[in-house]
Each structure stands twice: as structure tokens, then as C-alpha cells.
Amino acid sequence: MCVLCQKFGDPAVGEGLWYLNPKNYGRQLYRRRRAGAEFSEFGRGYRGAQVTESPIEVRNEAPERIPELVNKWWANVDKVRPAQVIPLEDAIRVAGLCHPFAAMMCECRLATRAREERNSAMYSCGGLGVGMLKWERWPERYKGGVDFMSFAEAKDWLTRWNREGMVAILMTYGAPYIGGLCLCDYPDCGMIRMRLDVGVGCLKGHYVALVDYDRCNGCGICVQRCQWGALKFEISTDKAHIDMYRCFGCGVCATGCPREAISLKRRKEIPALAEVW
Amino acid sequence: MYLPMNWRKAPKIEIDKHKCTVPMYCKLCLQACPQACFQVHNIKWERLKESDREEAGAYELSAPFRYNCTLCNVCTDVCPVGAITITA
């Protein structure tokens, strides 16, 4: 079972998934002071506790200590700022649970590629909850403003970015407070990058993608859409091949498939993958 | 998690802050780097005010993801002021 579901989920609500538990969006959690957590000057409440050294510094200077850092991070996963990959359907359900839902400029893309997203058509980062209501205090963070959306608009917005191939990642700001819904790709997104390069940052989703070999015609569209390096084109069989251990369950390949050959299966139904996060 | 087997210490990427003053305005290295090693931050925080990207010293370029650097030197070629030096 997912660590976050164990600690913050409610078996009676939303199939026991922690992000479908409305308590984790509560106003009371926003800005609650947590042990060891530092305040973020970007105006997003408290950051997670700093339990490890900077993962990027360790990766740069002492890569042999990465296993140690990863173990420490996973032992403190409820104190740090964990994130989790979610498929489109769950992202839409999350948009229905929180209020307000706002689109804004992506900070990661601004930092890594200096991509300035200045209008609501380009915004690719979702802010959830009461923290968004005072965005005007930090104009540097929210360049170009914030676009508050209704549920229907949020649904369209999420669907559009999913069609473009972005992975939805749910962000916490000091678990379990859910404050963001990032739409990410590699390498511009910090979360995917930290996970693939160092091994910390975000948890895998609750799903695993499976190919129906009878329906797959080998068009290869899914292969371009995978951000995790889990999808390959199997030339021998002329079909797509998903490495289930590498799959993060974002469902981007499934929504892109023109023949609906890829389906998502719950991770807990597959014995060897049930505890792979 | 799959990490590269050839773990090595990352190359050093030095950025001359006196030469590179407006990285957010220029952004050539950020967009050219094939491994996306660079990052640009706002270092001038003023309450309720957005920084001007053309103002010298408002933003700072750094290379936190230098573990990804392959020493291909695309960034040093593209830099108009020659502010980047890479040493293995």
C-alpha cells in the first residue's frame, strides 16, 4: 500500500486514495507549522522538512551516496514534500475536490529553459486551495497573473495538456496538504527530473499501463508520449512494449492511443508491483 | 529508478557573474543546452514588484544540473559574452 494512502487516506472515501480524501485539501493544513519545515518565500506556505542534503548537490559531488540519500528520503516521506503521479481521470476528480483551482506559470520551465508563460493559453501549472487567493503578493512567482477556473474549465484545461502529452503530478507543500497540480515533462520539470536522475521527489501512480497486443497496430504514438523511458517499440513483434517496473502510471500513453490498446490497471492488483512506488 | 552506471563527479561549470548580467533576457545557453544543465533564478526580491529581466543583476544563471553535462561546449559557443567555462 502507498505510504501516503496509509497515513493520509481514508478507506471509506475515494477508494482509499489519499488525494481523494477531502481532508487533505483543508484550509487548516495550509501554513500549519511543521517540525523542521522552512518557510518558502515564493508564497506557497511551508516547504517540506529538510531531512536530506540537497539531492542535486549529492548527485553532483558524491553520486556514490545516492542510495543513502534515497533511503533517508523514503524513511521520511511524510515529512518532506512528496508528490505523486496521477492519471487524467484522477486529476479531474482532484479538480472537483479543491477550491479554488487556478492555472499559472510553471516555475520549473521558467528556471530551466527560461520559458516565460505570459497568458492563460500557455499556463501549465495548477494551483489548488486557499493559497492561490493571495497570489498578488508575489508577482515575481506568478508572472503574468493567475487564471482562476471553474470545474468545467479545469477539466478542459487538464484534458488539453494531457492531449499534448504532459504528465499530471500532484504536489504537496508539507504532506498531506495538497497545493498544486503540475503538468510536467522531462527534463524541464523538477519533479520528474529528480525522480529519474536521483530517485527522490515523486511517487509512482496507483496504476500501471498494459498493452493489449491484439489491438495494438504498432503506430508508435505512445512511444513518443512516454516521459519515463518505460515504453519501447518492440520491433520483433511490431508492437509497443511497456516495461511495467519503469511505468509510473501517468496514463499519457493510454489517452494518446488511437486504437485504445493501452489500459490502466490498479497497481495493487499486480502482486510484484503492489509495493513498487 | 535507473541511474547511469558510470557515476562520476560532475564537471565544473563556472559562470562569470560580471560578464553574464541579463541571463533571463539573453537565455541562449538555457535554450541551447542539450542536457538542460542550467537554471536561472531571480535574486532581487522586492515586495509586490516583478523584476525587470533587462536589469543587470536581477537574475542569476547557475548550473545545478551539471551532473548531466557532457562537455559538448554548445553553451560556451553560444554565449555572446563568453561567460561560461567548463572544466572536467
Image (cartoon, grey):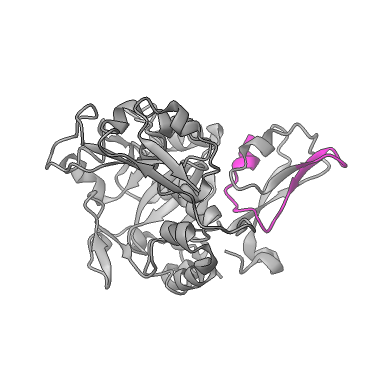
In the image, residue A271 above or below residue A121:
below
Check the picture and name the quadrant holding the C terminus of chain A. Answer: bottom right
Q: Percent from the top left, x then y, of residue A223?
A: 68, 38
A147 is within the stretch colored magenta: no
Snapshot quadrant of residue A81: bottom left
Snapshot quadrant of residue A183: top left
Q: In this view, does A235 lie to the left or right of A226?
A: right
| Residue nearer the viewer, A43 or A27 | A43
The residue at the far right in this view is A236
Q: Percent from the top left, x then y, of residue A253?
A: 64, 41
Q: In this view, does B25 lie to the left or right of A209?
A: left
The residue at the far left in this view is B47
In the image, residue A211 above or below residue A46:
above
**Whether residue A233 is visible:** yes
Q: Percent from the top left, x then y, of residue A155?
A: 44, 37
Residue drawn at point x = 41 percent, y = 69 percent: A8
Q: Percent from the top left, x then y, of residue A158?
A: 46, 38
| Residue nearer the viewer, A222 or B32 | B32
A253 is within the stretch colored magenta: yes
**Whether residue A20 is visible:** no
Magenta-highlighted residues? A233-256
In the image, residue A87 above or below residue A31:
above
Residue drawn at point x = 27 percent, y = 71 percent: A36
| Residue nearer the viewer, B13 or A60 | B13
Q: Is residue A129 left or right of residue A54?
A: left
Check the picture and name the quadrant holding the N terminus of chain A. Answer: bottom right
